Structures are given as structure tokens and as C-alpha cells.
Image (cartoon, coloured by chain):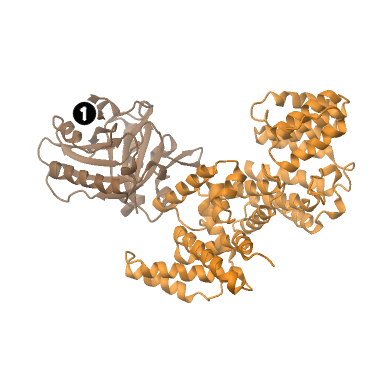
Chain colours: A orange, B brown
Amino acid sequence: MVDPLVDVEGVFRAESGRALATIARLVGDLDLAEDAVQEAFATALSHWPTSGVPDNPGAWITTTARNKALDVIRRESTRPKRELRSVRESLDDTPPILHPVADDQLRVMFTCCHPALTEESRVALTLRLVCGLQVHEIARLLLHGEEAVAKRIGRAKAKIRQAHIPLRVPPPELLAERTPGVLECIYLTFTEGYAATAGEQLIRHQLCDDAVRLARLVAALEPVDPAAEALLALLLLQDSRRVTRLDDHGEVVLLADQDRSRWDHDLIAEGMTWLDRAGRHPTINAGAAAYLLQAAIAAAHARAASWEATDWPTIVANYDQLAELTASPVVQVNRAVAVSFADGPGAALPLLDALVADDRVADSHTLHAVRADVLHRLGRIDDARHAYLAALATATNEPTRQVFRRKLARLGGTVRPT
Amino acid sequence: MRYLVLLYDNEAAAPEYGTPEWDADLAGYAAFDELAGDAVVGGEALHGSATARTVRHDGTSVRVTDGPFAETTEVLGGFYVLEAPTLDDVIELARRIPVVTQGAIEIRPLAQWIDPPTDSPAPEGTTRYLATMHGPETAADTPNSAEWDAAIDAHQAFGEIAGDAIVGGGAVHPTSTATTIRMRDGELIVTDGPFCEATQIVGGFYLLRSTDDSVMELASAIPVNDGGAVEVRPVLELD
């Protein structure tokens, strides 16, 4: 029998973001909505073990939370009578079984990603309120202390409340200003889900699913934002490879070794369509171009029938353009990988050696692993071994560390456990 | 919702009083006032930072010094109190204030405010001063805390001392609720936090009607946190 406790947690993860978004729309207050949803789950925790999990747990939670919010509003004597009446009417008009409404979540998303909040707060708040993650989970995802994350979220919510940051999707004339912050947050959520920075799991499926779902919502907004279309294309194309990135034992399968027949070809087709749409705008800004180029790179991989058939010169050209747009050394690392396949490992090594001296990526396990691979292909086995050890020392995600251990074992010699 | 909107600019680059550039600047503000209409609840321009004097509360002693609370390149040149339903609405207004393209505008939600008295004649020889509170932020700066309630009592006591000399003022929410905006190359830049941590206003401000000789004594009676300070600048009377 399934432990009902586990089920409540599972339902919380899957449904709390939607329930909160719906209640927030009804009461116009994030705090009240959050409290009501928490209370509804507390009720679930005490009822479900005896009554069993309802058929539609999400609707059960939303309805219960709605009633809790209504109770709070009825109890509150400080609210002006007229306001109370209008809120009560809007609540009473709502059908008892609620369905998640996409607009509700977009509204919460735009509030969480308001430019008057720091970028770190936006991501933490989105993970908490939109994706339904607990503070300790967010702390683990973002590699910060639990207390620091709780404080950051608390501070951001206080600012939303005290400075009256509105709960709304901005009007069309403001979307161009506001959407980049939302897209950045979705991108970070997906990235964190796709290659978790720490922990036992490489992929956090829930984060990937949430990010793709939110990207679809933003891409559907009018007026159309090419950056939103390009980001959706990028996420879909990346996500199409998700199931092939781990083998049956949960170990990482590198792109070169993935079973391409198991890539999700529906997602690839959809991603290509969005890429095509995003590429058709006569002018695009730098932010959109950055997503577009990354999507183009993902598309080049998706198009290749085999690793050997990959169009590396096109990928290098895309990275060249991307490097012009962003000063990110991570782009330089990825570009060096492409160069190593387009022009040979000998051409890539000087690029990577230069990056080892860059403080911003000196501790990046990706850089060390890429360099190790290039050294290996150049036949410099001892140097490759040292580079893998450096990669192992800097990686914090267990499946990734396992890849490096395997590579080291294949190179022979002594492997010091770390 | 009311917001204190603080206008910061590089004084050295600002137009000189009485020059055509000054007039053009003033016309820009007149245009903003017209556009914002009823949203403008209050606001004043200030004399330069060279006219500033500061009351410093160092534990037990109270000291008056010449000069601003902290020396910075960009200084407070004036402020507005704007009425707007949400932060988005106040940003939409504030982005049209002329200084936004060169300096910066800090937006602080007000927790309480004192409306200026209507049609009370100004005693001869008096002028108005802006007294801003600075220094370390404490629990007393968080609305509805016990410390906040205690601070309200202290401010009420000050109100009794100052009487009619208080012609305006407000209590701001903590600096963590501040938002700063700038406009550069036609692009709006919104950031979390106050414009400058060295000069940030903590607690709130008063508008005082007084004389040059007695304003500092009055300002010394404004309750501030230990280690706090009150900076006093004369208002530039434009009429």
C-alpha cells in the first residue's frame, strides 16, 4: 500500500503551484493564498490517511484552500465591507471544483519575476510559489543555505506586500520590458532540472516539466516575443533527449552515446517549428538572439542522424555568434568542444588552457572534463588523468562524478577516491 | 498607496539656478506635474548639498555638523510623494520624471504620512526644511512591530514639542522594500534596493517650518535610532 504521507507530498509538489495561483487570483493576495494552500494540505495530511486520497486531489486541494481563504476573509474585520463583499461574491461564484488556469500561473510568475526583486529572489520565489518546492529543496537546488533561502523568500514576499507589487500579467505595452526576467527564470529552472548542480539525481523531471509548461504559456502571450519563442524551442529540443541521458542504472549517457531513436521526435518537431517561428522576426534583440542561437545548436544535434554526422562547422559558427553576444566563459567552453570536433582536439586545447586561467570557470567541472577529453584524444594520457581528477574534485552532482570515475578507470592508473 | 519618490542627481552636472538650462529643467518638471495630475500628493526641490547640516546621535551625545550625512557624487535634489495603486503604477509615473535619464530615482512605500496643514499663514522669516532620517536600520523601522509602536510614541512626543513647525512628513517601510529606477539609452533599468546604501533614508522624513537659527535645535529633537542621524536641507521655494 502506498503511504498516504508520501502521496500528500507528491500532490503538494504537483498541485500546490496551480492551487496557489488560482486562489491568488480569487483573493488578490499571494500571502493569503499561500497560507490557505498550506492549510488545505495540512487538512489533507490529517484526512487522507483515513478517508483515502480523492480522485482529483488537485481539485480537492484547490476547493479546500478556497474555503479556507474565504474563512479568513470572513473573519477579518479590518477589511472594508465593500471590498469584503466583492471578494466573497467572486469566491462564491466560483464553481466548487476548480481547474488549473494557465493565466493564473502566468500572473504569479510575472509577480515573482518582477524587476524590483533581485534575480536570486525571483528564482527562489518562482520555485516556491509556482513550482511548489519546499524551502529545503530550493536550498539544495540553488546551493544555498536553507536559512538564507528562507530569508530571501520572506524578504521578497514582504516587498511584494509592502511595496504593492501587483499580481498581474503586465499590460501589452510593458511586456517587452517584463518578459526577459520571466524567461531568464524559466531558463534557470529548466537548466537546474536538466542538470542538477548537486545531489544524487542528475535530472529533476518536475523542474523540466514546469519550465517547459511555463515557457509554453509565455510563448503564447500577445504581442509575440521572439525570445519567448526561441526559449521554448530551446527547451523542447533539449528536453527531447531527456530520457536517453540516463541508462537503466541511472548513470549518465553522453550525447555521443545516446540512442537517438529514443529521442522524443514529437518534441523535436515542435521545437523546430518554434525555432522557425522565432527566426522569422525581421529584427530581434540580443536576449532573443542568445536563446535563438542556443536553440539552433540544439537543433543541429537533433538533426544529426548520428554523432559522426553532426554538423560541427555550423555549431561552431553559432557559438561564434553567441560569444559575441555574451561574455560568458561557459559559452567559450562549449565553443571549444565544438572546435575540437570541427577542427580537431589540437585546435581546442589552447582555447581550453586559456579558460583554466579564468577565475569564473576555473572551478567548473565541465571545463576540466572537456579539457581531459581533448587531452585524451591527443594521446596525453597522464595529463588527461589529472584533468579528470580536477573535474572529479569540482563536481558536486553524484551521477556526473560517476562519469568521471568511469573515464578515469578507463584511462588506467590509480584513482584516488574523493 | 503612497510612495516617497527620491530624486538623485549629480549636482556638479545639474543646471545652475537662474540659467536657461535651469528654466528648461523646471519646464520638464512642470510637464511631469501636469501629466501626473492628482497622483502628485506632495514634493519639493532642495537647495544644494552645501547647505546641508546634520544632527548625529552618537550613543549618548548629540552633535550638529555642517555638511550632509554622507558625501556622495549623486545627491538628493528633491522628492515627490506620489499616490498610486501599485508599484507598477508609480514606476510608470516616475520614469517620466526628468532626472531619471541622468540620475536615479528611489521609490519607497510610505507606511504613514503627515498631510501638510492647509491655509495656515507662514510666520515671517521662516522657511521650510527637509529633515531626513539616516543610520542603522532596527526593528523600530518595521511597521507594526512592538519597537515600531514605541517609536510612534516617541514621534508623537516630538510632534508635541514641534507643534505647527511640522508641515509634512512620512514614515517609510524598511530599505528592503526600496526600488531604484534609471533610464539609459531609452531603456528602463529597475533594481531592487535603495539608490545608495551610504545615504539611504531609514525611518522617514519631516518637513519643518523654521528659521535658520532654530531649525537644528528642532531637528535634534527628532527621535532616531542609536547611531542614527538627521540631515537638514532647506527647501527651494519655487513660487
Q: For the residue labelled by badge 1, is the local secondary structure a helix, a strand or a loop?
A: strand
Q: Amino acid at mark 1?
A: Val
Q: Which of these two is toward me, B148 or B42?
A: B148
The structure residue drawn at horizontal position 24% and vertical position 37%, both measured from the top left corner, is B130
On screen, residue A351 above or below A263: above
> Would you name the residue on which mark 1 appears?
B62
Left or right, residue A240 beside residue A149: right
The structure residue drawn at horizontal position 60% and vertical position 46%, both measured from the top left corner, is A184
Residue B1's spot in the image, x, y percent?
35, 54
On screen, residue A406 above or below B87: above
Q: Which of these two is toward me, A365 or A361?
A: A365
Which quarter of the figure is the C terminus of chain A placed in? top right
Residue A147's spot in the image, x, y percent?
50, 44
Residue A334's spot in the image, x, y percent?
75, 35
Residue B97, picture quadrant: top left
Q: Which of these two is toward me, B98 or A180?
A: A180
User: Could you tell me if residue B199 is visible in this image?
Assistant: yes
On screen, residue B53 above or below A237: above
Q: Which of these two is toward me, B173 or B119?
A: B173
